[in-house]
Amino acid sequence: ILNVEQSPQSLHVQEGDSTNFTCSFPSSNFYALHWYRWETAKSPEALFVMTLNGDEKKKGRISATLNTKEGYSYLYIKGSQPEDSATYLCAFLYNFNKFYFGSGTKLNVKP
Amino acid sequence: NAGVTQTPKFQVLKTGQSMTLQCAQDMNHEYMSWYRQDPGMGLRLIHYSVGAGITDQGEVPNGYNVSRSTTEDFPLRLLSAAPSQTSVYFCASSYSVGLAGGMYEQYFGPGTRLTVT
């Protein structure tokens, strides 16, 4: 069983704040790291797929970075909005075909 | 294009009963997988398939069987339901696996909420 850890577990911010959270994963045998956004009563939806050390991806106000040598990825949200409230999951791809998910960071953005 | 569909949405079983959770995708994806989601534990992989006729175990396979006779369908069978299998089950699919497979995102179904009494 692989250890994929996300921190913090939950985060409460005010509208307009910028925030970031962390996903830690094994630094050996890296193939890919995925970030998913999971809104209440919906299914997880992919945000980013990251495969190379040093990768930086951006989608609107959300961006992510990847450090495979030290085994971590950061997700940043600039100027948080209430619609950003969701649980953010990271998933580490092991051995080409098994995904190990972290337990998620639950973000609540207050208007 | 319906994406990934799952049936039923909700199910209540008695201990010892068996049932099959259905999952289908219409995107011609090679890779399909089943996860269970329990409070505080994220998504845990039960079984996965890299193509028709090929399945393998994930992180928590005990008490579950799968088969993949077609590209589209990937049912999950509970052989003898136990209260520990009370959970929300998600099916997901992805275009490909292997060396390039990590580049492809997973698409998730709406989930099945299962309660075993």
Image (cartoon, helix red, strand yellow):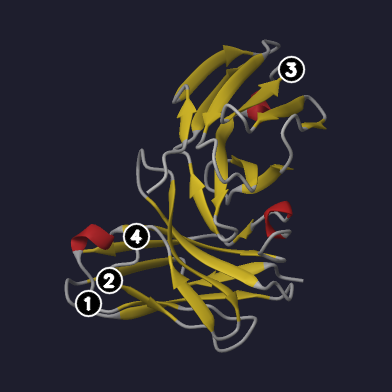
Q: Quick check: do tags 2 and 4 share a chain?
A: yes
Q: Chain of mark 4?
A: B
In the rendered image, residue B94, in percent from the top left (x then y), is placed at 67, 63
| Residue sitting nearer the eye, B100 or A100 | B100
**Mark 4 or mark 3, which is nearer to you?**
4
Find disc 4 in the rendering and name its residue: B60
Identify the residue at horizontal 71%, vertical 70% (top origin): B2
Q: Quick check: do tags 4 and 1 share a chain?
A: yes
Res A77 quadrant in image: top right
- Tell whether B89 sits left or right of B31: left
The circle on residue B10 is: none
Find disc 2 in the rendering and name its residue: B63
Task: Give the answer, above or below, for where B115 lies relative to A9.
Answer: below
Q: Chain of mark 3?
A: A
CA gap between label 4 and label 3 equals 37 Å
- Tell whether A105 sits left or right of A77: left
Identify the residue at horizontal 52%, vertical 47% (top origin): A41
